[in-house]
Amino acid sequence: MARLYSVLSVDEGWWEYEKQEKYARLKIDHLITSDKYNPTAKRNGKEIKSAYGVDQFLDSRIITNDVKNTTNIQNGVSLFPDFHYKNYFRLLDLTYNKNNESRLEFKPNRYSTLKSRTHFTPIWYPDKTNYNVYTYAFDAWTPVGMLSVNLLDGVYVDGDMWDDWTVRPLPVD
């Protein structure tokens, strides 16, 4: 037979509390730029032709007075305009995490012939428009909860990869 016991605790007023003020904030540097293998990128990688790839670099640093009880950004997910920012996303890879600093990048793209960490823009993407990537970075934990951030950056699209192809006659022997 099970017995139930009830324990009644009474506050007799002898507890002493110590107030500890803690703070934590994120410093984020976010960049969407042309893939490093793009030969026709302009304006420091901020202008590309469609069908080329874009790279993402998300550098974060947590500023806190409680280093041992906080973590830096550990995860991220990016959404793209060609999918109307739904139905398709890319999880980010934690490529650096040390001393309250971390870096997130795209995971290596299995469709890239150079296995680079890139996301290819669609060839049909309209000219003279921005290709903005929306990123949600999260899992920065503190004693009072999680810090996260929403980010938006992109490149300007003007032209497409077919502009870089040339056709010439074969030499005649």
Image (spheres, grey):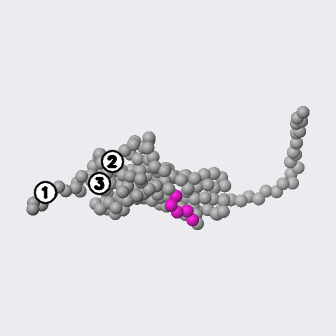
- Dot 1 corresponds to which residue? 169
Q: Position of residue 52 (x, y in %)?
A: 32, 54
28 horizontally vs 45: left or right: right
Question: Residue 108 got which mark?
Answer: none
Mark 2 = which residue? 122
Q: Residue furthest left?
A: 173
Disc 2 vs disc 1: Cβ atoms closer than 8 Å? no
Q: Which residue is mark 3?
A: 49
Q: Amino acid at mark 2?
A: Pro
Measuring 46% from the left and 55% from the top, which residue is drawn there? 107
Evaluate if marks 3 and 1 touch, with contact meaning CB atoms under 8 Å apart: no
Horizontally, is 157 left or right of 104 in the view?
Answer: left
Other-residue count near label 1 (Cα within 10 Å), few / some / many at <14 / 14–19 / ≥20: few
Residue 20 image offset from top left, x and y in percent: 71, 59
For marks 2 and 1 on the same chain, the one whose residue lies earlier in the sequence: 2
The type of residue carrying mark 3 is: Lys
Question: Which residues lie in the magenta part?
Answer: 94-98
Q: Quadrant of the N terminus?
A: top right
Please report the residue visible at 55 percent of the width from the left and 56 percent of the height from the top.
73
Q: Nearer the viewer, residue 98 or 7?
A: 98
Q: CA distance from mark 2 to mark 1?
A: 29 Å
Which secondary structure lies at badge 1? loop
Q: Earlier in the sequence, mark 3 or mark 1?
A: 3
Nearest to the eye among marks 3 and 1: give it: 1
Could you classify mark 3 by the number of other residues whose Cα lies within 10 Å: few (under 14), some (14-19), or many (20 or more)?
many
Task: Verify whether residue 43 appears in magenta.
Answer: no
Label 3 SS: strand
Q: Main secondary structure of the magenta part?
A: strand
Label 3 and label 2: CA atoms lie apart by 10 Å
Inter-mark Cα distance, 3 to 1: 26 Å
Query: How many marks on residues?
Result: 3
